[in-house]
Amino acid sequence: AASLSAVHILGLAAFMVHLHASMAVSPLVQLLPPMQIQAVPLADALSAAVLCNTHTNMIFSVRLCVAAVCYGLCRGDSVSPQQQQDYIPNSLYKK
């Protein structure tokens, strides 16, 4: 994660936003080891894989989440605030 440039992080964030936006057609995945009883959307599974346990991981997580939220807001700026949530996974807001 530390070796990724800003362009790579923005690309990864855009990928996560597009995955979340296409949730109606994307499959649910079961995390291993099971962190939750039910399967979760792929964007949430990717978000769960972003760790915040070290300083380096925390910096990467903040950069990724801010990029994803900004990209999702820009992508959904022509829709109502309620529909903007369709562009940004809740798990990224929490991080």
Image (tube, rainbow, N blue to C red):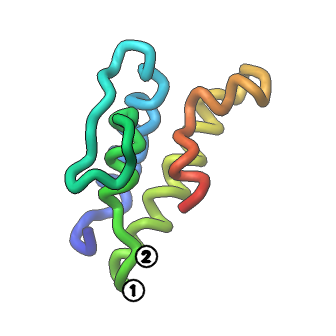
Q: Quarter of the image holding residue 55?
A: bottom left
Q: Position of residue 9 (x, y in %)?
A: 36, 55
Q: Residue furthest front?
A: 37
Q: Quadrant of residue 73?
A: top right
Percent from the top left, x then y, of residue 24? 44, 15
Is there a contact, CB below 8 Å, between mark 1 and mark 2? yes
Judge by depth and name the residue closer to the eye, 15 or 40. Answer: 40
In the picture, measured across the screen, residue 16 lies left or right of residue 79, that is: left
Q: Nearer the viewer, residue 77 or 47?
A: 47
- In the picture, the quarter occupied by the N terminus is bottom left
Which quarter of the figure is the C terminus placed in?
bottom right
Decide if residue 10 is in sight here: yes
Q: Secondary structure at mark 2?
A: helix
**Horizontal and vertical percent position of residue 84:** 68, 30
Q: Label 1: which residue? A: 55
Q: Which residue is mark 2?
A: 59
Q: Secondary structure at mark 1?
A: helix
Image vertical order of residue 72 relative to residue 78, above or below:
below
Mark 2 is surrounded, within 10 Å at the Cα level, by few (under 14), some (14 to 19) or many (20 or more) other residues, namely: some
Compute the Cα span from label 1 to label 2: 6 Å
Q: Residue at image x 41%, y 43%? A: 44
Q: Position of residue 86 (x, y in %)?
A: 59, 27
**Residue type, numbered disc 2:** Ile
Q: Is residue 76 left or right of residue 62?
A: right
Q: Amino acid at mark 1?
A: His
In front: 2, or 40? 40
User: How many marks do you count on the picture?
Assistant: 2
88 vs 58: above or below: above
